[in-house]
């Protein structure tokens, strides 16, 4: 019986490390990650020997060793993970739940067969089947959620695997084991099915919510785009009307100029011509670039900058047909442009300036913003992005730019120099 328990635990620890390795993107190389997982597997197996073989009847030893193993498992997942947040903890706790299922079924098989080898073989196969089902059904969904920076609410979701684990332990192992109370087997099987369904439903719900959020953000962008088109249409309509009036009055101006020429009133003629030029300039519709979407967003941002009294030095070179998704590209420009405006809008008039450079042509994409900053900016040690001091729901514009950069294989860099904040995004397309 003792050898069966040892090997059952060893199989569970093995699949636990495999689960963490497959469901978490790695901070280190594959070889280093494998060695870290193997070291954790070795420590878990060694501590099993202590509580199962050296001190099998010592409840205090069993308790503290189990706590150590739980901490070791979760810290391993966090340590090897590229991102270290509540999502990683959620996956580590979930991994513990899924491998405990294999241990439970090993015990069930042993109870019904009374033989260790068939029970261990069955347990190993159940672990393989569970891993395959999870890998095929939820790994892709999970990794998409894992890669997103948005982590609000995931600490609460961590309670789900915690309570599942505690419930498993109470039903199957403590205070009485399945060997002592085999009548609990139907209940534990139903509990396993419940956990399976719960996890899949929760992850799919989270995935759906994220998709709905993305759709909402795109709708906001489209709304902004449509409003920009409406504004441009109004400006064009208004300009056409004013120019019609000017054309109608030109014969009067021509008559006045002819009369003034006869009187040699050249200065007055210059004033009339200057007035005509001013009216023409006022009714000229500004076109920043040939891409309609980008032009609309830039027009809206420039109008907003004007309302704040901000002097924007704009350098724009964007082709009509973009090699990237123009909606995502426009959203990034809008976010970064807006960040620069919000940063300087309360400054003194002479410091209310922003440099915006956007080039997307000849197979290269380059975005650069520069604006004054009054406060010291904290940068995330991992992402290199500035940390928002306004709370968790802020700073999403920079995260959106970083996600766009990752998608197109670009690089993004942020830094402060001589009282100015710089942001540079570059990619070869």
Image: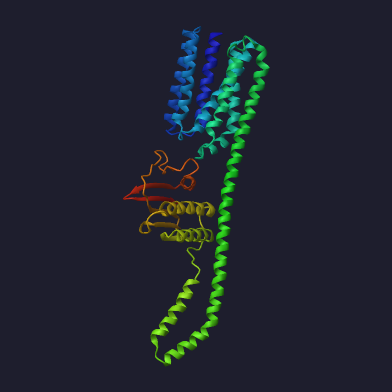
- Residue 381 position in % (x across, y down): 39, 38
- Residue 196 position in % (x across, y down): 63, 27
Residue at image coords 43%, 89%: 260
Taking depth in this image into account, of 51 and 12 the one nearest to the observer is 51
Question: Taking 418 as reference, is 341 left or right?
Answer: right
| Number of on-image labels | 0
Image quarter hosting the N terminus: top right
Q: Quadrant of residue 8?
A: top right
Q: Is residue 425 visible?
A: yes
- Residue 16 position in % (x across, y down): 52, 24
- Residue 75 position in % (x across, y down): 45, 26
Residue at image coords 42%, 81%: 271
Q: Is residue 158 above or below residue 397?
A: above
Q: Is residue 420 above or below residue 10?
A: below
* Residue farthest along the bottom direction in this orientation: 262
Taking depth in this image into account, of 375 and 397 the one nearest to the observer is 375
Residue at image coords 50%, 63%: 290
* Residue farthest along the top direction in this orientation: 57
Q: Is residue 121 visible?
A: no
Residue at image coords 41%, 84%: 268
């Amino acid at each position: 019986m003792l050898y069966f328990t040892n090997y059952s635990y060893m199989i569970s620890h093995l699949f636990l490390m495999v689960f963490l390795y497959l469901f978490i993107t790695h901070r280190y190389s594959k070889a280093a990650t494998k060695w870290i997982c193997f070291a954790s597997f070795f420590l878990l197996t060694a501590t099993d020997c202590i509580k199962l073989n050296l001190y099998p009847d010592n409840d205090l030893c069993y308790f503290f060793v189990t706590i150590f193993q739980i901490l070791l498992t979760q810290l391993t997942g966090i340590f090897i993970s590229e991102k270290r947040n509540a999502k990683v903890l959620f996956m580590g706790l979930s991994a513990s739940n899924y491998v405990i299922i294999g241990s439970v079924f090993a015990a069930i098989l042993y109870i019904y067969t009374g033989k260790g080898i068939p029970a261990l073989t069955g347990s190993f196969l159940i672990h393989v089947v569970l891993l395959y089902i999870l890998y095929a059904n939820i790994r892709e969904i999970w990794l998409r959620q894992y890669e997103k920076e948005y982590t609000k609410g995931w600490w609460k979701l961590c309670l789900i695997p915690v309570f599942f684990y505690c419930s498993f332990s109470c039903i199957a192992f403590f205070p009485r084991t399945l060997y002592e109370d085999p009548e609990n087997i139907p209940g534990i099987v139903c509990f396993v099915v419940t956990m399976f369904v719960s996890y899949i439903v929760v992850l799919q719900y989270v995935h759906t919510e994220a998709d709905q959020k993305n759709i909402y953000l795109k709708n906001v962008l489209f709304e902004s785009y449509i409003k920009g088109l409406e504004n441009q249409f109004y400006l064009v309509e208004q300009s056409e009307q004013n120019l019609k009036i000017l054309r109608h009055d030109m014969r009067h101006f021509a008559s006045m100029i002819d009369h003034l020429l006869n009187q040699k009133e050249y200065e007055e003629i210059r004033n009339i011509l200057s007035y005509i030029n001013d009216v023409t300039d006022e009714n000229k519709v500004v076109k920043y670039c040939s891409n309609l979407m980008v032009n609309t967003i830039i027009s809206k941002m420039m109008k907003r900058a004007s309302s704040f009294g901000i002097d924007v030095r704009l350098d724009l070179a964007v082709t009509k047909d973009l090699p990237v998704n123009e909606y995502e590209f426009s959203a990034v420009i809008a976010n970064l442009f807006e960040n620069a405006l919000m940063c300087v809008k309360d400054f003194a008039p002479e410091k209310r300036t922003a440099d915006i450079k956007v080039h997307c042509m000849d197979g290269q994409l380059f975005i650069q913003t520069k604006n004054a900053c009054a406060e010291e900016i904290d940068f995330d040690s991992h992402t290199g992005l500035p940390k928002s001091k306004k709370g968790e729901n802020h700073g999403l514009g920079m995260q959106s730019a970083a996600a766009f950069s990752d998608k197109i294989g670009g690089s993004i860099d942020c830094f402060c120099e001589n009282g100015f904040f710089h942001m540079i995004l570059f990619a070869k397309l």
